[in-house]
Image: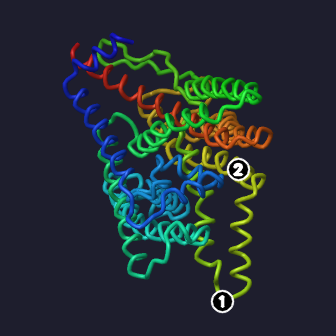
Amino acid sequence: MFDKLIQIWKAKDLRKNILFVLGMLVIFRFAAHIPVPGVNTEALKDIFSGNQILGLLNVFSGGSMQNFSVVMMGVAPYITSSIIFQLLAMIVPKLEEMQKEESGRQKINMWTRWLTVPLAAMQAFGMITLLRRSSTAILGDIGALDLLGMVVVISAGTMFLMWIGELISEKNIGNGISLLIFAGIVASLPQAIQQVIVTFDPSQLFIMLGFIAIALVTVVGVVIITEGQRNVPVQYAKQIRGNRMYGGTSTHLPLRVNMAGVIPIIFAISVVLFPSMIAQFFIQARTSWIASAAEWVIVAFQNQLFYGIMYFVLVFAFTYFYTEVIFHPDQIAENLQKQGGFIPGIRPGKHTSQYLANTTHKIIFVGALFLGIIAILPLIMRYFTGIQSLAIGGTSLLIVVAVVIETVKQIESQLTMREYEGM
């Protein structure tokens, strides 16, 4: 371990990239403590401590939601915008073609940023409306101009975090958006530990020990699933060029059990929180059935059973969805055929593509099922124990472990690349 740290420190450009990423995370944490003026933070904390969905949203915003900071919405609008365009790319042929080209991907990224602005404004207005209706003591009596100012400031904060996330991603140290969420979760850890110590009840000792055991099992399980892969054998045909013979080697194609990493969890949380935000706009609609539908949505998502089922289904579905986005068996089969490679017993071309797709769907089922179960396991624990922190801790732990693994792998790949350059 120390040898790796020494290698990282000696690699000047890698060291600069890591220090840059740490600097950006410090700026994010500094912004998370700059509150929007005119907010009663004590009343706000009481609201978040008693609401499961708001508490979960606060965790992923790094406590900035509870502080009503200028970056209170975090990167959730940007994630929602990314989901929309990835879904559109699967049903709109022109967008699908654009994703295959670098210039097309740049245009889609630009459109994603543009869509983030109205989504951030809409979610900020929805959150402010929700808090105003929850308790008049939080924001007091604010006028239309004050409300507009708050929405503009909060939307600007989201765009600022989106920019920081993209800067981090460019350094190839990890996914910028995931690292921002990771930093928010880690920053809230000391306060969570302090709260557990202060409110510790000896009668809940076995419950806490059970939570620690589940946390350890979660860590081990996430590592196993993230590192797990199926090696598909690949044989390269022999080729004679002049007086020399090339190829004839055997290797393997690694198919990971969880190719999507932590992205399905982030997507699922963004989607499961979005309907309640939208419903806030229609809760006082003049049309009775629209107001009733909005109220039903809000009540439904506050129900733990409905929330848990939706959370599980979304995590499971997004694991498959994101795998389809990043894994292209047609391209892999085409590249293998061009290089003279084939899977023993499988014909090159279309048959190889179908084989890879079927194999991937089978192994991804295990990864999707595992992620879904781990995501709702803390909710089950909270149902039996009544401890709020358990529900938040499990999902946070899942993201933290996955992000750490992903970041370490990217750093190791850069170290390996530099070793080859040295040779």
* Residue 64 in view of the camera: yes
Place of residue 137 in the rendered image (x, y in percent of width and height, measured from the top left): 54, 68
- Name which residue type carries label 2: Val
Quarter of the rendering occupied by the N terminus:
top left
Q: In front: 195, or 375?
A: 195
Rendered location of residue 390, percent (x, y): 67, 38
Residue at (50% x, 54% y) in the render: 66
Q: Distance between the residues labelled 2 and 1?
A: 33 Å
Residue at 25% from the left image edge and 20% from the top image edge = 9
Residue designated by label 2: 313
Residue labelled with disc 1 = 286
Position of residue 410 in the picture relative to residue 49 (left or right):
left
Q: Is residue 151 above or below residue 95?
A: below
Q: Mark 2 or mark 1: which comes first in sequence?
A: 1
When the figure is inspected, residue 335 is found, relative to residue 419, above or below; the finding is below
Q: Are marks 2 and 1 in contact (CB under 8 Å)?
A: no
Give the residue displayed 41% in from the left and 57% down from the top. Answer: 69
Pick the front one: 174 or 157:
157
Closest to the observer: 144 or 299?
A: 144
Q: How crowded is mark 1: few (under 14 residues within 10 Å), some or many (20 or more)?
A: few
Residue 411 lies in quadrant: top left
Is residue 185 depicted above or below 97 in this figure?
above
Residue 142 image-quadrant placement: bottom left
Label 2, secondary structure: give it: helix
